Amino acid sequence: MALKLETINIPHLPASLPVHVALYRNVQNSAFLRQQLLAGNAEFEYAFIDASLIAESFRKLGIADSTKDLLIVKVSVTPEITHDSVAAHLESSVEGTSVPFDDMTLSEISDITKIKKLYKLGALPSPAAKPDASQPHQDEARRRLELSMLGAIALRGS
Amino acid sequence: MADEYKPPALPSPFTNTTPAPTLLAQGAEAHLYKTVSLDPSIPAALKVRPSKPYRHPVLDRRLTRQRIIQEARCLVKLVREGVSVPAVLAMDWEGQGAEESAWGGAWLMMEWVEGPVVRVVLEQWEAWMKKNAASLDESQLQKEEDRVRGLMKRIGHTLGGLHKAGVVHGDLTTSNLMLRSPAQDTTDSPTGVSMEGEVVLIDFGLAGQSTQDEDRAVDLYVLERAIGSTHPRSEPSFEEVLHGYRESHKGTGSTLKRLEDVRMRGRKRSMIG
């Protein structure tokens, strides 16, 4: 099965620092992947921006033995890290179904209840599980939840 | 010859941004740029609070950090409460500088709001009316007045939502009110000036969290004075702001009563006694 690895140039980063993103569903070897992190295997780097929040972030957002859906983000910080090298590494490491990294797929995966709990947004109206053009207020609920979540992320640690 | 003005260097990572952010406005405290979010197809507003070289560095950092976080907290709270303000997309209160991790100031990236500010809308409308009102018949004049009153009422509703959420703006002028351009504009007016679109509150640089009648009344008073001085022809319609405000939620009565006191004495509280 073909790996759907997206390579993205972020407008605020130099062109020499592309970002590679892959999304997997139905991951079979989460326990193995998690073990690599715990063992400090340098081939499996898991980066968190704020060191003081690593433990909490990992518990809430990181990989668990039961993880089925996995989002992988890799920044090319050296020229040796290329689309092909990242693809090869993922193909040999992750056992799962590679799916497109896009809004449609993410909306199928996202767990609204969990998101609301994690970002303390319980009071907000819940959007429907699937986008529905005939329900414009559902779009509004989704928009409000997304923007509230972005705000909460931006303010983390303040 | 005076040197050509150069705005201060952008904070990291925006020195890398392609295309470079465009400077839109600069005030005493902040510079406003137009840029894009993580995806080049999503426009964003970038507010930078540059460091002040004349201030003590430690004090400068602390003040800048406090103020930008306060602004962001107000915006995030309002987005959660469903009040129409630009959402916060990203920020950095530590302000990694452009060169060698020098303190370059803090920044706040916000959702881009497409549309005019109410100041321009009212100015254009007033200019047209001044020149051409004589050519309108009575029903057309009535219709134009109703449009302005309708806009004022919507502004009042939005301010009611703001105050209900526990935030006061601190600097309400018609430059800090925008109309988000609607997908379809159905304006039918000889003036050619649209007043459609959702009212969006912007620039929360002086905002704070408060539920005091005094603070709320001062917000309303500052806007009343701003409209009176910038838009004389629209001033009589200001009462519609208060109507909209009164309708927006319960408990506005005590604020509106306080507004009368504030009008008597002006914005500043007496320092005597």
Image (tube, coloured by chain):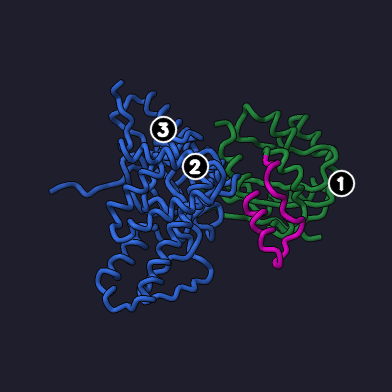
Chain colours: A green, B blue
Quadrant position of residue A137: bottom right
Q: Disc 2 versus disc 1: distance between alpha carbons? A: 62 Å
Q: Which mark is residue B64?
A: 3
Task: Give the number of callouts.
Answer: 3
Residue A56 placement (x, y as % from top left) = 70, 30
- Quickly name the residue at label 2: B253
Who's the residue at 61% across and 45% down the image? A148
Q: Which residue is mark 1?
A: A28
The residue at the far top in this view is B273
Q: CA distance from mark 2 to mark 3?
A: 36 Å
Quadrant in which the C terminus of chain B appears: top left
Provide the secondary structure element on which disc 2 rests. Answer: helix
**Residues at badges 1 and 3 in contact (C-beta under 8 Å)?**
no
Residue A60: say if magenta. no
Q: Does residue A131 appear anywhere in the picture?
A: yes
Tell me which chain the residue with mark 1 is part of. Answer: A
* Residue furthest left in the image: B1
* Disc 1 residue crowd, few under 14, some 14–19, many 20+, Cα 10 Å: some
Q: Nearer the viewer, mark 1 or mark 3?
A: 3
The stretch of residues the image draws in magenta is A121-145
Note whether residue B107 is visible.
no
Q: Residue at x 74, y 30 (%)?
A: A40
Magenta stretch: dominant secondary structure: loop
Q: Nearer the viewer, residue B65 or B116?
A: B116
Front-most of residues B262 and B105: B262
